[in-house]
Structures are given as C-alpha cells and as structure tokens.
Image (cartoon, rainbow, N blue to C red):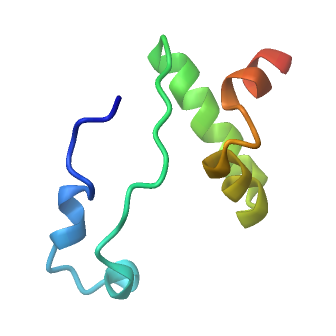
C-alpha cells in the first residue's frame, strides 16, 4: 500500500515550464512489481499506447498491467 504523500514533491516546484500550469499533480495510480525490469516493462507498455482511453482503463482497474505483460 502506498504510504507516501498524496502528491509528489515536484508538484510544489516553482518551475515555469509547460506543465507548471497543471500543478499540483495528483497521484492516481500505483502498481507494485516484483522486479525493476517488470516495472519498466509496464511503464513502456503504457507509454506505447499513447492513448488517454487505455491509460484511464488502467487507472480504473479495467486493464491489469501484470496480465498484459504475461501475455506478451
């Protein structure tokens, strides 16, 4: 279970970059993996989708990342 802060510390940065107007950020999803390799593979899978719909399905629990990785 995630026991860290509700928002990452970077959310309170004084940066004026592109994403500055979207702060503070909100953590909406956490998934634990047995190995760093599995975690990176899951992150790359989500990034390859380039789809808000698919990302939303992961957050809602409609897509299980571990099952998807096993199917590859």
Q: Residue furthest top?
A: 34
The residue under the point 75% across, 39% down is 63
Q: Is residue 60 left or right of residue 35?
A: right
Q: 46 above or below 2? A: below
Looking at the figure, which quarter contains the N terminus?
top left
Q: 23 above or below 27? A: below
The residue under the point 77% across, 62% down is 53
- Can you give x and y, in whole percent of width and height, for residue 55 in the image? 68, 55
Q: Front-most of 35 and 16?
A: 35
The residue under the point 53% across, 18% down is 37
Q: Is residue 64 left or right of residue 5?
A: right
Q: Where, by quadrant of the figure, is residue 40 drawn? A: top right
- Can you give x and y, in whole percent of width and height, for residue 43 in the image? 58, 39
Q: Front-most of 1 and 45?
A: 1
Q: Front-most of 16 and 64?
A: 64
Looking at the figure, which quarter contains the C terminus?
top right
- Can you give x and y, in whole percent of width and height, for residue 6 in the image? 26, 54
Q: Where, by quadrant of the figure, is residue 45 drawn? A: top right
Q: 47 above or below 38? A: below
Q: 28 above or below 16? A: above
């Amino acid at each position: 279970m995630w026991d860290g802060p509700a928002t990452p510390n970077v959310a309170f940065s004084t940066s004026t970059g592109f994403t500055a107007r979207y702060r503070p950020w909100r953590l909406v999803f956490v998934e634990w993996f047995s190995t760093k390799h599995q975690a990176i593979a899951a992150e790359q899978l989500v990034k390859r989708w380039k789809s808000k719909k698919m990302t939303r399905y992961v957050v809602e629990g409609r897509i299980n990342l571990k099952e998807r990785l096993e199917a590859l």
